[in-house]
Structure formats: structure tokens, C-alpha cells
Image (spheres, rainbow, N blue to C red):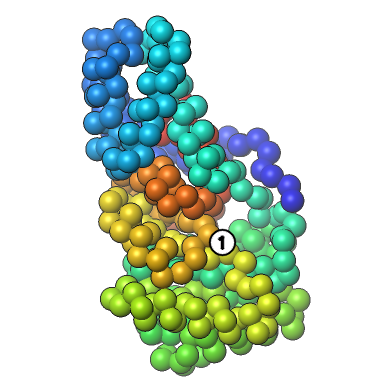
Amino acid sequence: MAFFGLFNKEKKETLDQGLQKTKESVLEKIGRAIAGKTTVDDDVLDNLEEALITSDVGVDTTLRIIERIQTRVAKDKYMNTAELNTILVEEVAGLLQENNTTDVLDFSAELPAKPYVIMVVGVNGVGKTTTIGKLAYQYKQAGKKVYLGAADTFRAAAVEQLCIWGERIGVPVIKQQQGSDPASVAFDTLSSAKANDADVVLIDTAGRLHNKINLMNELTKIKNVMQKVVPDAPHDVMLVLDGSTGQNAFEQAKQFTKATQVSSLAITKLDGTAKGGVVIGISDQFKIPVRYIGLGEKMTDLQVFQREEFVKSLLGL
């Protein structure tokens, strides 16, 4: 499967604009951390630690980053503060690589299964259905045949919203009446997709977290029923998180990773927040690869996550 090539200028501009609020916040805090200093010493590291924690990177992840920089400082003996941003890029990108967040595949790449089934999970309001629509659009633009399954049958609005996306993009949406069994919708979707030689299937699911046991049972049932049609489905369980909620996104990730086997993350709404550091912390804490980031309203504003470019943009490089 082919990997993305060069990060083109348009994508870079979208990324820079989308992370503008976070970048301004982070750079201001790092600026304060190194004010009046020429070398990276204990005071600088203490201030940098505070800057990262208050940027929603999270305490544990921040401590890991600081430890990595301390190792570099001890090795190099003398490190200029002007080098700090470059060192941060290298160490944070290295941390994300260790957490299996590698730069992911182009939408046009050959998929590992046909149909390739993505079950999308997440609480209501995080941009789950919108993310599905944007993914469907980009897969279709890349020449893939896409099917959508409206398995969030508890909210009429969720089914309607997915149908609007389907009409807008020109892809079929399989649905049933409100209150229908979500697993039945998933079964019908995969059956139809398989019969029509689809490449990609995106299954929307309900976003309720009021009872973890019920959520776990429901998602397990959907998976079991899908496997009657496509034995190894779903190939990806994607958790959608709202990046603007900061630390609350950590709690949602904790609940969903307990309820089902999440294999990838999409983090949305980064353009409207200064809490973009949450992407780094969540990836590190849960050891789940970030696949996509949401940077705006346009169809193309859901970007494939590329760790080094993300960190560079965050630090204004």
C-alpha cells in the first residue's frame, strides 16, 4: 500500500490555519518559558513543562517529553534555547511514532480488504456523522465505491444527517426506521455493499455513554452480526473525539476503549480551539494511532494526520 508523498503546500496552509489558535497559545507559553535564557536549563524545562500541560498535552505525556529533552540536554551538554522548537518537533514526533501513530495511507491506496469496513464510534456532538461524510467524500474522490450505514437508529436526526451527506456526495445510505436494531442496519449495509462490489463501508453508531455495559453489548452485537457477512469486519473501529473539549476528550477515550477495541482516532474541531495539544496526549496515553484531524467545515478539511507536519505547525515551523 502506497504512502503519502510530499506534504503539499495547500495541505500545509490548511493545517497552519486550522491550528492557528493552538499555535499562538503554545508559542506564547514557550516564549515565556525561555524568556531571558540562552541555554536550556532546569528553569527552562520547568517552564516548558507548565507550557505543555496548560496546552492540554496532559501531565503524563508532558513528563515523558521533558524526560526525552533532559536526556538530549545531558548528552549535548550545551543546548541553545533557539534550538528548543526543533528539538520538540523531533522528540514529540518520535513519541508519536512509538505510539504507532505513523503517517497513514492515501485515500487512493489499495485497501487491505474489500469491502473495507470502518465502524465509527463516539459520543453525540463530536462531529461523528460529519467525519463519516468527509471520509466518504475523500474516498469517493479517490475512485472508491462507498456505502454508508445509518446504525445510529436512536436519533432520527442522526439518520437524516447521514442521508443528507449521502445525497450531497452521491453515495448510497442504508437505513431503517428510527428505533430499529442497529445490528440489523449494519447487516443490511454490508450485504448490500458486498453485493454491489463496494470498496469502503462506513457504519455510524449511537453515541450514548450513559451505561458502559449497554454500549459494550451493543457494539459487540454489531460487530458479531457484521462478521456473518464479512468475516473479519470491522477492519477499523474509529473513535471520533472533539479536540475542543480538551481533557474531557481523554475521558471519552477512556470510556470507549473500555467498551470496545478502538483501533484508530479521528480528532475534530481543532480549528476552533487552543487545545490542539490534546492530539499528542491522547495518542500517547492510549497507544492508538491518530488517523485523521478535523480542521474546518469544508469536505477537504478532514486531513490525514502526519505527525511531524502536525508538530511543526503547532510550533510555527
Residue type, numbered disc 1:
Leu
How packed mark 1 is, by other alpha carbons closer than 10 Å (few <14, some 14-19, many 20 or more), is many
Give the labeled residue for mark 1.
135
For residue 33, above or below residue 19: above
- Compared with residue 132, is residue 93 higher up or lower down, i.e. above or below? above
Q: Is residue 128 visible?
A: yes
Report x, y in % for residue 39.
33, 9
Please tell me which residue lies in front, 142 or 311: 311
Residue at point 55%, 78% (across, down): 223
| Relative depth, front residue between 181 and 299 | 181
Q: Residue at x 68, y 78 (%)?
A: 230
Q: Position of residue 51 (x, y in %)?
A: 26, 31
Nearest the eye: 65 or 181: 65
- 54 left or right, relative to 299: left
Q: Is residue 91 above or below residue 305?
A: above
The residue tagged with tag 1: helix, strand or loop? helix
186 with respect to 153 (left or right): right
Residue positioned 43% across, 45% down in the render: 284
- How many marks can you see? 1
Residue at 68%, 38% (x, y): give it.
5
Q: Quadrant of residue 252?
A: bottom left
Q: What x and y, as percent, mark residue 73?
A: 40, 15
Asked where in the image residue 240 lies, by quadrant, the reply is bottom left
Residue 190 makes an appearance in the image: no
* Side (left or right) of 29 relative to 16: left
Q: Position of residue 220 (x, y in %)?
A: 49, 78
Whether 285 is drawn above or below 127: the answer is above
